[in-house]
Every structure is written in C-alpha cells, then in structure tokens.
Amino acid sequence: METEVKEAQGKIISAENPEIIAPTDWQPVIIGILCNWCSYAGSDLTGTSRIQYPPNIRIIRVPCSSRVDPWFIIKSLQSTADGVLISGCHPGDCHYISGNYYARRRFLVTKKLLNFVGYHENRVQFSWVSAAEGPKFAKVVAKVTEDIKKLGPLHRFKKENF
Amino acid sequence: MDYSKQIQEIASKLFADNKIDYFIGYKQNSFDDSQVPILISDPAEIPKLVFTDNSVFNLTNYLKPDHTKRKRVGLVVKGCDSRALNLLFTESQVKRENVYIIGICCEGVLNEKREKAQNCIECIMPDPVVYDEMLGTPSGKKEYTINVDIKELAEKSLTERADYFDAIFSNCIRCNACRHSCPLCYCAKCCIDQETSTLYNGANTSSGAMHALMTWSLHLAGRCVDCRNCEKACPSHLPLHLLHKQNESVIYENFQKHLAGIEKDDRGAFYKYSLSDPDDFIL
Amino acid sequence: MNVFIVETDKTGLQKFYEEIIGKFETYAPVEKFGKYDYKRVSKLSECDPDSPIETTMSVKPLFFPKTAKVMKFTEDSSGTTVSETNDDPLTGKRVILGVKHCDARGLQVLDQVYKWDYVDTDYQKRRENTLIISTRCDKAGAQCFCTSLDYDVENSDAHDIRIVNGLDGKIYIQAITEKGSTFLQASGIQHPASVNDAVEEIKKHYQSFNASFRLKMNYTEVNAKLQNLFDSPDFETVSSNCISCNTCAFICPTCHCFKISDEKIKDTGVRYKSYDSCNNGYFTLMAGGHNPRPVKYRRWRQRAMHKFVYFKERFGVNLCVGCGHCAISCPVNISIFDVVNQVAKV
C-alpha cells in the first residue's frame, strides 16, 4: 500500500487514519468467510455462470456461518485485510437448522463493538446468499469492494510491522 | 451495611452441622481499610469474617475447581455476584447442591477513591437472584441505564475513539489477571493460551493485547454480570468495563432486553435466538 | 561513597530536572488511567519525579522490556535466513528520574542473573548507558520493608545520583557513583560550602526514614527456618485465595522469567521474548504433557522459596527487595511479607 501524498483529485483517505492517503488505483484485500452449504455453493454458481465480480476477495470456506468466531474477524483485520465479508444461509435454510440464527446475534454485537473501538462500520459486512443466488453473490462482492475502496487502506490496530 | 456478625453465625452453624468443606467470605486487608477474600476450612478462622461496603471482590470466582476442588462450599454473594451463580449452575460448572448461598441485599460498594462504585450506581439487581439465606431487605429490580462512559465515547469521532483504545491496548501487560478474576472465564485452557502462537500473539504487543481483549469481551458477551472484578484486578488500571458495557447495551436493546444471569435458567444471550432478531444490517 | 553534594531548593531542583530533560532521553513516573509508570518524557510538566505515589510497575521494563524482539527470520526456497532486528539501538545515553530505593536495588539484584552463566549483552548495554537518579523515599510506604532484607539504605550504591529531602527543608543532590559524579560536575551545578553539614543532614534524613517503617522482618530467622519448611502444610492455607493471575511476577522489580513466541506473516517472522510468571498454571507444562506444578500452592511455594531462600543460596543476595508492589497490585492483596512470616511462624 503506497502512502505518498498525491495532489491529483480523487485521493482515497483512510477512514480511521486521515493522514494515510492511497493512490486511486489502490486495491483493497477482502477476506470472505463463506458457509459451505449455501454461500460457498452460491459463489461457485457465480463462477460457472461466468458472472464477473471484483477479484479482491479471498474466500475461506467454513461449515456454517455459526463457525465464525469473532477472533477470525479481528485476526483478518490485524493482518493484511482491509475488510471482511461473512456470508451464510438465509434464516430458516441453515443446513444445521439453527446455526445462522445464533450467528446473526453474534454478528450484530461484533459489528457494533468493532465500530465502538474505532473501525469504520463498513469494514466488516455480512450477507445471506443461498446456493442458487449466483448473481446476488456477485452483487454483494461488488458492493463490499466498492464500500471498502471508499474507506481506504486499514492502518489501525495492525500487527506491528517487522 | 454491616453483616459481619450474621455471616459469622451462619458460617459457624454450617461447619458445626458438617454441611460445608470451605467457607468463602471476606476478611480485613492487612494494610488498608479494604476487604479481601478468605477461604476458610478451619472453623477457628471464622472470627476473621467481615462484610461491609468495602467487600468488593466477586467471590463466585473461587468456585472454579482450581480453588475449591469441587467440594461443598458456603459462599457470600451480593446481587451482581449471584447473577454469575445462575449462569454457572446452568452451564454445569457448579452443582447447586454443593453451594450454600448467603445472599446479601447490597446497598452498593465503594471504589478505590471511597465513593460509590460506578457499577453500583448503575446497578440493575441489588438483591440476590438465588440464595439459601438472604440478609437485608430486598429493594427490587432497577431500571437499566446505558453506562455513562460509553454514551460519552459514542459521541466522539471514529479517530478519537481509535486513539483512546490504542492507548488502552498498548498499556496492557498481558498478565491475564482480568481472565483469572472473572467468575465466568472457566475454560480449562483458554484459547488465548494455546501454544500454537500463530493463533494468538503470545508476546506483549499492542495488537496482541487488542486481539486478546476484544475476543475475551466477545466470548463473555451476554454473560458478563458487571461485577468489575476484571477492572479491579488489572494492574494497569485499564477501563475494561467499556468493552463489556458496550456489548451489554447492544444485547439489551436488540435481544429482548436480555440481561445476564437474572433468569434462573439463563445461559447467556448467545445460547438462544429469536426468529425476530434484527438482521437489517445483513445484505 | 562520593562526597560531591549540591545543596539546593525546590526551584533549583526543577531547573536541574528541566536541564536533564532538555539534553537527554529521560524517563520519569507519568500518570495514565490513574496510575503511575515510567515513560519517556519531553517536558517536566508531563511527569512527577517527586511524587511519593507508588508506580505500578518498577523500573525493570526499561532494562528487561515486557516485549523484546530477539531476531527476524525469512523463509524461502533456499531455507531460513536469520537476521538482527534494529529494534533498540541502545547507543544513546538516558536518564531515569524518580527511582525509589527498592527499584534501584532490584536492578543490582538482577545484575547477578544477567552476568551469571550467560552474559546478556543487551541488558548490560542498557545498564551502562543509563543514569539513575532517585528521590521519593522520605517515608516508608504501607507495604515497604526493604531495610529488613540486608539492605543498608543509607550507604547504598544502587543510584548514581541521590536526591535527599533534608529535614532542614533543603534539598541535597548527592553523587554516589563515578558515573553520577562525572554527570553532576559536567552539569555545572554549584555545590555547598560545608560538605560536613550536608552529610549530617543526609544522615538525619535516613534515621527518620529507617524509623518510619511499619513492617519489619527478622530476615535471618525467616531465611533459616524456611530452608526446612518445604513440606509445610501452611503453604496451602496462605495461598488459598490466590487467583494465579501473573500480576505479581510482572510488576516485581526482580522477577526475570520470560517466554519466547514466534509471530509470522507470510514468509517473514519475528521472535519475541516477553514476560512470563511461575504463578501461571502452564508455566511448568512440558512438551510431553507432564506438569510438575499443576496445583496452586506448589506454585506459591516455589515463588516464596525462590524469593527468600534459593536465590540467596546461589548469589548471596535476597531476590525479594521488599518493595511491596505485589501486595498493592494483587487483586486480592496477598502480601509476600505475610506469607513468609506465616509459614516460618515468626
């Protein structure tokens, strides 16, 4: 991530650290944690349908959105990620019956706490994407990438650089 | 508020009837006017027991097997402490028949500056929610109010909050006193202490402290009873209640006004769900 | 003992501090979240070097840091390359203000460990490049008992420069070591005409200081008795309310246990050395799974014996320096003074 000051218009300023400025062609790194039964299958469908979506997302597969512990999110944000997307089955469709109901409670509290501590609220986003929703997944990734691009590089609470 | 005499009488009777192996109460500190926990197994030490408004430490912490080895225990609890008991019973950490509970209707304890402690001013349940014997007159459940510090912080800008928390996390010395003094942190091996240090940073860096403290507060969310043991134990005097109270207020506002440990079968906010939980923040 | 002594007053002392802060990298007790700790200061107004309030941690983190990078490593197809970290250059001279007697004595005790079987060059460099200036010991604190532990406070050479608040209202700045004497002379500060009077006033100060101790221990008796009390059942009673939280070892001026952890991102990593505590349940956990000290009282016994018996046997000086920091910061206020006295039945 370059941080030289550019006089040209359209600068991207980091939301949490206004002194960090990135060039307009900066690309964010987004970690996507997708549940195996719905969202991961849905993203597969997006690919086989040849629908384009931004390549910034790196996907990690988990058995259920309920597997996501808050520390995955925090660890990603402390490493090289600028944002995190977590996606699961629609309420009522969870392969394990009620996993996503527990997960959505945890998601809300985690999101609010991260915002309270000093992350912009759009750094961590959540979605329900089913296995048949190939186009929706592409739209979700495009939206999240766009949001994080506007927020600029994340420099807060990062692991101490070596 | 002084229940020293009554507690000494009850403890004597419990030992005389051979109902308990340990009695956990408070004794006078040797160098100032505060009170500290004492675990008595010899009835000769009963005269040391006191209870006043300097009896702050949440004694349910000693129900972990490390301290009382799952034996029969007599225990003094205030309102907030007894909420932790409800959670410990439901989560199968302590057997109800192994604990004889003396519940005190608390009038608030004092902090280091000898003023009424903040969590006592904002107390929602001064009466014991579970007890075998109750001392004092119950005053009923109080109205929940949002903690003043988090209200103040929520009004600041994002960068100001981030700077403030940066200072907190870099002052943490990773001593783990907060976890060890919390009654609801009873995992035999905490995830933070795993030897595979690629999961958590074992070193005392600021990012490691942030990771550990944030994860700890989220694992405790919906179960924290606001006893402030963690804050009192912290040698760096970090305002840890900010994280816990923030989670508590989000849970209260969004999940049917849930407060940890008030109901008898409570297992914390994250062990249940409602079909009408908010999910408008989810795409 | 050097007799280069300067007599001054409050204003003179403030000027002396300001001069030091202006010229050197200076550390002093700074308040944060209601407690004091030694931090780098750039102005006198940021710190309070004369405050009698206890700092939470001693001066130890400035010599044995709570986290230190040991090395860097990079992995590639040809193998692993190890390199130095440019973490702490240790080349600059620095000054620490407001160091109490117990903290300075703690450094002298730590010196024994760090030049023993393996000479820790980082620690030695930090010690050589640091000047220690004291004040703040006018009256003993509620948990202080340094004078009981074979420590002659008046004739101690733990500090380089000592600042004594005389009972006559004057302030005496006394150089104790060569380093301190050179420093004081170079600072250009004037010295009094009558050195004998100053020495008298300093003597009187220490008489009053020694008399102000609430806690006094019969150290020789405690040390002798403890040597045969390893199997005493009293260890279990005295440690029953300990919560094994590691606080006492982290803030002790002489505890020196550490752990090593590796931190990696992609192909590069750093090895860290950070504080550890024998009070931790997993301190003695070995690779095979065996843990000799799984029970709380065994760990407390180890702590008490190391502080008052084993270290003295090996190095001739007591490991505990009687500062009382542990009792004040302990969440349940366990005092090692009470513990050893109770076990030794003294």
Image: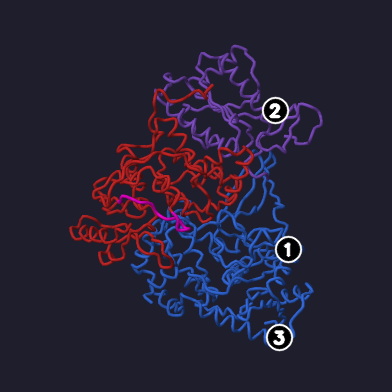
* Chain C display color: blue
What amino acid type should be assigned to the residue bearing mark 1?
Answer: Ile
The tag on residue C21 is 1
The secondary element bearing badge 2 is classed as loop
* Chain B display color: red
Whether callout 3 and callout 1 share a subunit is answered yes
Relative depth, front residue between C273 and B141: B141
* Residue B232 x %, y %: 46, 54
Could you give the CA–CA distance between mark 2 and mark 3, rounded to whole angstroms?
Answer: 72 Å
Q: Are marks 2 and 1 in contact (CB under 8 Å)?
A: no
Question: Looking at the image, is B257 positioned above or below residue B180?
Answer: above
A146 to the left or right of C151: right
A145 to the left or right of C329: right
What amino acid type should be assigned to the residue bearing mark 2?
Answer: Gln
Name the residue beneath numbered marker 2.
A27
* Chain A display color: purple
The secondary element bearing badge 3 is classed as helix
Name the residue beneath numbered marker 3.
C195
Give me the chain letter of mark 1.
Answer: C
Q: Which residues are magenta?
A: B104-115
Question: Which mark is in front, 2 or 1?
Answer: 1
